[in-house]
Structures are given as C-alpha cells and as structure tokens.
Amino acid sequence: MTTARPTVVIATDDEATTARAMRRDAIALADLPAEPFALAPSAILAYASVRSAADCEAALVALARGVELVLTVDIAEPHASAFVDDLARVATAVTRDAGPLAGLSADQIALLDGLAAGRTLTDVARTLGLSRRTATRRLSEARAILGAATTIEAIRTFEQRSGP
C-alpha cells in the first residue's frame, strides 16, 4: 500500500495568513516537537516563511513526518531553488503564484532555463536527476502551459516572462 505524499502549498503571505485562519490546529513550523512523531495525512497543518537553509531542513523533516505545509518562499534567496526542487521530490507541491511563470513546476523552469542558456536537454536532465524521457515529458507539459507549439517558442516565451 502506498502512502499519500504530503501536500505543500507555496503561497503568498496573504494566502498563508488565510490558510492559518481556516485551520484552528495550524501551528508554526518552528513549534513542531523536535522528537520524532508520525501523523496521519492532514493531521497537522504547519506554516512558515522559508528564509534560511535551516528553515528548508525543518520543512523537509516535517514533510517526512506527514505534516501538511503552507510555505512562503522568497525565490530570490540562494537556497530557494534547490529547496523547491527537493519539495517536488518528496511532496505534492502546489504553487499559488500568479506571476509570469505560473503553472510551471520547478523542474520545468529549470529545464527551460538550462535550454535557454544553450545546454542540451540531456545535460539539463542529468543535472536535475531526471531521465531523458521524463525531461522530454516535462518539457512537453511546459510547452502546453506556455501555449507554445515548439520548444524554441517555449524558450522564447520563458525568456520573455522571466525577464533579464
């Protein structure tokens, strides 16, 4: 029997505040007990602003213990990109971003970014720990999200939306 993956919502500050208000049992990630615990899925909702490598580690430990998370992540921070990639590997990540890259997963963004930088799909896939087949599928999904008919068109759209 497979265990359901915990859910992580990467939210804006306002959405995180609303989520906390809707669940009376929501607690700050920092207030979770340090000793090992196991929970049924959705037993606890924790929230946090992830601003440091220690916050990233605490969030990943909480996910491993079955805690549902609502997080705000400053993607400009040096640790944020790797953290979002880690989240995608261990949880069902839901991004509530209305930004120009809304709907794209961390892997899709990394693939497009690598291709835009002139790297091959095989090279980018290897860096992300993906098979070429998985990378091709995620790139196809990214093209659909961006409304692009070709990979070149998807890269151009990605570059326009992501800015300089």
Image (cartoon, rainbow, N blue to C red):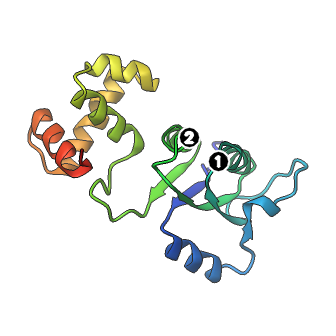
- Which x, y percent locates residue 151? 15, 34
Q: Quadrant of the C terminus?
A: top left
Q: Residue at x 61, y 54 (%)?
A: 50
Q: Amino acid at mark 2?
A: His
- Which x, y percent locates residue 31? 82, 63
The quarter of the displayed image where residue 33 is located? bottom right
- In the picture, measured across the screen, residue 151 lies left or right of residue 12, that is left
The quarter of the displayed image where residue 155 is located? top left
Q: Residue at x 52, y 71 (%)?
A: 13
Confirm or deny contact between disc 1 and disc 2 (CB under 8 A): yes
Per the rendering, the mark at residue 52 is 1
Q: Residue at x 61, y 50 (%)?
A: 4
- Which x, y percent locates residue 113? 29, 34
Q: Is residue 27 above or below residue 145?
A: below
Callout 2 environment at 10 Å: few (<14), some (14 to 19), or many (20+)?
some
Q: Is residue 110 above or below residue 42?
A: above
Distance CA(mark 1)–CA(mark 2): 7 Å
| Residue under numbered circle 2 | 79
